[in-house]
Image: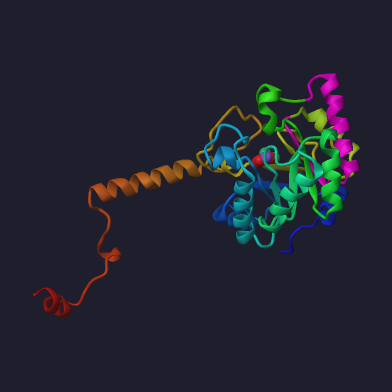
Amino acid sequence: KQPLTITKLKKMKQSGEPISMLTAYDYPSAKLAEEAGIDIILVGDSLGNVVLGYDTTIPVTLDDMVYHSRVVARAATNTFIVTDMPFMTYRIGKEATLRNAARIMQEGHAHAIKLEGGADIADEVAACVRAGIPVMGHIGLTPQSVHQLGGYRVQGKLEREAQQLIEDAKALEAAGAFSIVLELVTEPLAEAIASALSIPVIGIGAGRGCDGQVLVYHDILQYASPYREKKFVKTYADIGTTIRNAIGSYVSEVKSRAFPQQEHVFPMEQELFTQLYG
Ligand code: KIV
Ligand code: NA
């Protein structure tokens, strides 16, 4: 299987083929996502929540993203990889943004970066694109601004907010973004935005009218995901329970000496044993 390109992604939108995207953060998650045939792996800064144990994505650093991106790239060598720029590593001027984006590409081995924001970051998006760095936008609920937004709430419910989201989406397209993520907005608004743009709109909690869907690895697998109210997530497996039960069995077999058994041990020849230990 050939990895996707931004050209092919745009063609998928034109031909109406939905785009599948899932986060991954380490070797096993990336490997399994690739083997399952995912179109795009997102090394999301959601790793702050699901891998590093923070309450928000705000404490995630550029070093964290570079490190995890590089590991994912090592595991999924045939998949298009988008890596998040974390909180305040952009919006700080074009030069600093470019330097930070360069680390994600050069050290993190990503194919593209993702930035949260709309018209307000259009200049920085354009600067990255001019420098040869493909940019995915991210609007709607933008977790890096959770304290400004006042919580994880559905966005664009008011006329004024909806208008702003449409303008932001168009500004990102005009700045050269190859795609945008639309998070936690009503289905009709998402559908309107997807049809107003020629670049693919990938939704999370944004309904059926998007050009693709993205979800978080630990959420769809019930992999010890710190659960907040997530109506938009579908659980495809419960590996958390599987893992907990398996570890529980291991613990009780060690305690009861049911493990290890004959088949797990290394025997020694009787003659040698006698020689050594009499
Ligand atoms: O960090 C992340 O996982 C994301 C997706 C939820 C879009 O940005
Ligand atoms: Na993110």
Viewer-side residue, 185 vs 83: 83
- Total numbered circles: 0
The spot of residue 182 in percent (x, y) is 76, 36
Q: How is the image coloured?
A: rainbow
Q: Of all residues shown, which one is farthest toward the left?
A: 278
Q: Is 180 a magenta residue? A: yes
Q: Is 121 a magenta residue? A: no
Magenta-colored span: 156-184
Residue occupying the point 89% across, 40% down: 197
The spot of residue 82 in percent (x, y) is 71, 50
Viewer-side residue, 105 vs 19: 105
Viewer-side residue, 87 vs 113: 87
Residue occupying the point 23% across, 52% down: 257
Residue occupying the point 30% across, 64% down: 264
Asked which quadrant contains residue 150, the reply is top right
Q: Quadrant of the N terminus?
A: bottom right
Picture quadrant of ligand 2 = top right
The spot of residue 245 in percent (x, y) is 39, 43
Q: Is residue 264 left or right of residue 25?
A: left
Q: Quadrant of the C terminus?
A: bottom left
Taking 207 as reference, is 16 above or below it?
A: below
Taking 120 as reference, is 94 above or below it?
A: below
Q: Is residue 48 left or right of residue 267?
A: right
Q: Is residue 81 left or right of residue 175?
A: left
Asked which quadrant contains residue 153, the reply is top right
Viewer-side residue, 117 vs 201: 117
Q: In this view of the protein, can residue 153 be seen by the observer?
A: no
Residue occupying the point 87% across, 46% down: 176
Q: In this view of the protein, can residue 9 be seen by the observer?
A: yes
